[in-house]
Image (cartoon, rainbow, N blue to C red):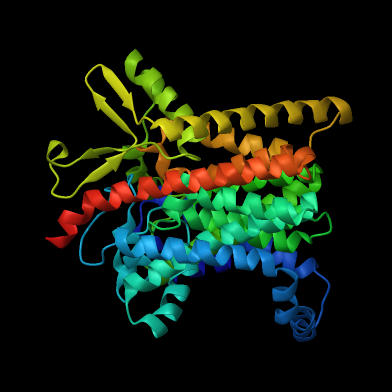
Amino acid sequence: MALAFLFNSLFMRLLQRPLLEQALLLVFSTAAFGYLSFVWLEAPRRNLLPDIKRYFSAFKFSAFVKANAPGLLLALPFFAAYFSIGLKLNPADMDTVDNFLDADNTSWMIRIAQAGGAALEMRGPHPFAYLLFRPFGFLLNLFTHNFALSAIALNALAGALCVFLVWLYIRRQAENQVYALLAGSFLGLSTAQLFFGSVVETYIFSALALLLFFVLLQNAETPLGKLVGAGVITFGITFTNFVQALIGFAVARPRLKEIARFVALTLSLSVALSLLQAAWYPSSKLFFLPTDAQAEGEYVSLFFQDSAWRAVGRVVLLIRTVFLYTIVAPKPYVFIEDVGGTFPRFNFFKIVPGTFSYAAYSDLGKWLILVWGLALALSMFFFLRDFIRARKFDIRLALLLCVFFNFALHLIYGYEPFLYAPDWAYALILFVVISLQPLAKSRIFQSTFLVFLCLLAYHQTQFIQFILQTIAPYLNQ
């Protein structure tokens, strides 16, 4: 409590705040500092330096590259594709916030890598994103000397690493190199991954943190400390995504004491880092203060209180977005003058009084959706069959719950739900790929999967080309 009072008095203007904020600051910081202190005191005393030396001696970079060469080589063309598209969809000299499916790309490029970018407000849902992103932005600036280029490269790298982690997960799970390559490619070509691997936002980093968490969780011997570290990163980027990490942990390690310790450690570290960011970057908001959280009210809409057509329209939009648009891109709506803009704005839905309209598919898109729908249905069949046989659930239950958590959350939060698609795309694709594992060694299935991916790649290319052709005249101006 003394440490909390001293920290908040020195760095958080404690005595100048309203009484409620004073109380919340002291309660949260005392709880976090107190728990971390007790954990440190009860830990066995060890010499940290030999532990660090042992870790780095065990991690041989050349051996890692050799062991994971196929996955790294798979990620490389995806990085090139995301980076190339990103250079065209993130103009450094134009403010395109909200234009590309509601993404705040311009402001996040500034936050990540511009010299004075930390002056921009950091909202409460991103508790310590500055601490996570700006060191990488600064490092890349040493080579690029261009904040936009640095942010785009970092974003594309995160997207490519997501592809690698899916490859790694499925290679371990299915022990089939070909199937792992197909699975990684599937994630990389999905609309959510392709778009947000290119358009700078936080959500591709959220997907990377969540995938890292599930890869670590895959090994039953992974120490709690590593899972806590991945959970803290997930929390720091977007705190609601910690629920997904918690779901995964609870399903994989259903022991109440261990779950409680995981939650307590992750939340304590996250609160401490949030306070550190707020002290270091005064523009940052604290997620647990009501005054700092009020701004989120404009993104909350209780759909069940709306008129019937809007409520039903929102539900249908979420169903289409989560289960269709996330994987196969529809043709987006384009708005310019009708929304008072001077640059095209893209969305996957349109609202006029009394009518909710949804982005539609071309002929090839319809066939791709049909195949995807069959794969999804077959995956659910295998999932239920395996449960009936084994009388217990596996990690697929956690992945499915993560998808439905996002569905429930975005019924009431956000305008364009596709903006958040990377938060559930990884879970949806892993669920399907793991469920279809009994077919993984079939050459017919592998060939069908490959043909589907080739057609999907062509279709997604047309989607990106449509956006680029639409914005080209405005960029030339």
**Could you tell me which quadrant the C terminus lies in?**
bottom left
Examine the rendered structure and indicate whether residue 346 appears above or below residue 134: above
Q: Quadrant of residue 84?
A: bottom left
Decide if residue 18 is on the left or right side of residue 28. left
Q: Position of residue 110 (x, y in %)?
A: 32, 67
Residue plotted at (64% across, 51% down): 182
Examine the rendered structure and indicate whether residue 263 appears above or below residue 135: above
Residue plotted at (20% across, 61% down): 94
Q: Position of residue 90 (x, y in %)?
A: 30, 61
Residue plotted at (66% across, 38% down): 432
Residue plotted at (46% across, 75% down): 135
116 or 278: nearer the viewer:
116
196 or 171: nearer the viewer:
171
Q: Quadrant of residue 358?
A: top left
302 or 417: nearer the viewer:
417
Decide if residue 298 is on the left or right side of residue 6. left
**Could you tell me which quadrant the N terminus lies in?**
bottom right
Examine the rendered structure and indicate whether residue 253 appears above or below residue 10: above
